Image: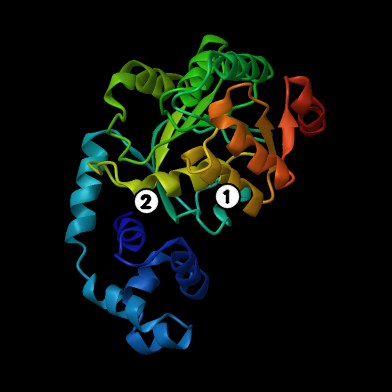
Amino acid sequence: MERWIWLSSIPHIGPVTQKKLLGAFGNPERVYHASPSELKEIGISPRAREAIAAARSLEKSKRILDLVQQKEIWLLPRDDPLYPSYAKDVAESPVLLYVKGQIKPCLPSVGIVGSRSCSNHARRAAEELSARLSSMSIPIISGLAKGIDHAAHTACLANSGHPIAFIATGVDECYPKEHRSLYEAVINEGVVISQYPPGTVPAPKQFIQRNALISAWSSHVVILEANVKSGAMTTAHFARKHAKKVFVFISNDARFRQGTNCLINQGIRPYHSFESIEKEILPIL
């Protein structure tokens, strides 16, 4: 697994180039041994070729692998059958994920995201939606953040559901720290997933990538309140890009009216209650 870790952590080499390299060479071992001329031949940019050449050492990968083993973290490479086929080819999906808990990939699966400072109306809607879906054994995907994410996964756990949480830190880190009990419950009953190695601390662009993975693993995405510039809006953007079925909660809270109207104007369907999504879900079960 050292070379999977190596490939996934080369600076300036993102998921698209990672997958291009695997497509050309077949496995990380052959990528590791590829010559500069071979890399140039398949269209790898000069900057990326330089990054690969500068990262030939496996010392970093060995240190990460030691941490993974010490902290009982599972590695999910792209060629593992548990890596969902509907997620692995999404442009933003990396070739390696770090996992704590148990993966049960299945469709449908619903991403529920929204504002950290949500209204009580939206919180109750998230709880109701998550409870109904969990009673149907449909996984609930979210980001372990405050507000809507917390409500969705708490209701999922209360109804014996399968929570899937994507985070923007290493899976050995709980962020925010006050969600420690929820984080541990999700690991016990579902799974926490990150593309970042253990010890990784939060950074703004990592939350954007986290939001992309929430969309990638979801068949449907429900946005329950979002400001125009927010993580939930970013998730909605990725969901449209990934051709997911997206819904937006019609909030009575004036703070979120501009965000709601923006999404409605983009053609995203309104979410009023569970019945708004039920007819989309049932044919897939």
User: Where does residue 154 sit, x and y in percent of width and height?
Assistant: 48, 15
Position above or below: 19 against 214: below
Position above or below: 181 against 99: above
Instruction: Decide which of 92, 249 is in the foreground and name it.
Output: 249
User: Where does residue 209 sit, x and y in percent of width and height?
Assistant: 44, 49
**Which residue in the structure is indicated by mark 1?**
238
The amino acid marked with disc number 2 is Lys
The amino acid marked with disc number 1 is Phe
Quadrant of the rendered image containing residue 104: top right
With 48 as the anchor, is 189 left or right in this view? right
**Which residue in the structure is indicated by mark 2?**
205
Position above or below: 35 against 284: below
Badge 2: how crowded within 10 Å, few (<14), some, or many (20+)?
Answer: few
Outermost residue toward the top in this view: 158
Q: Quadrant of the N terminus?
A: bottom left
Chain-order first, disc 1 or disc 2: 2
Instruction: Decide which of 11, 79 is in the foreground and name it.
Output: 11
Disc 1 to disc 2, C-alpha distance: 14 Å
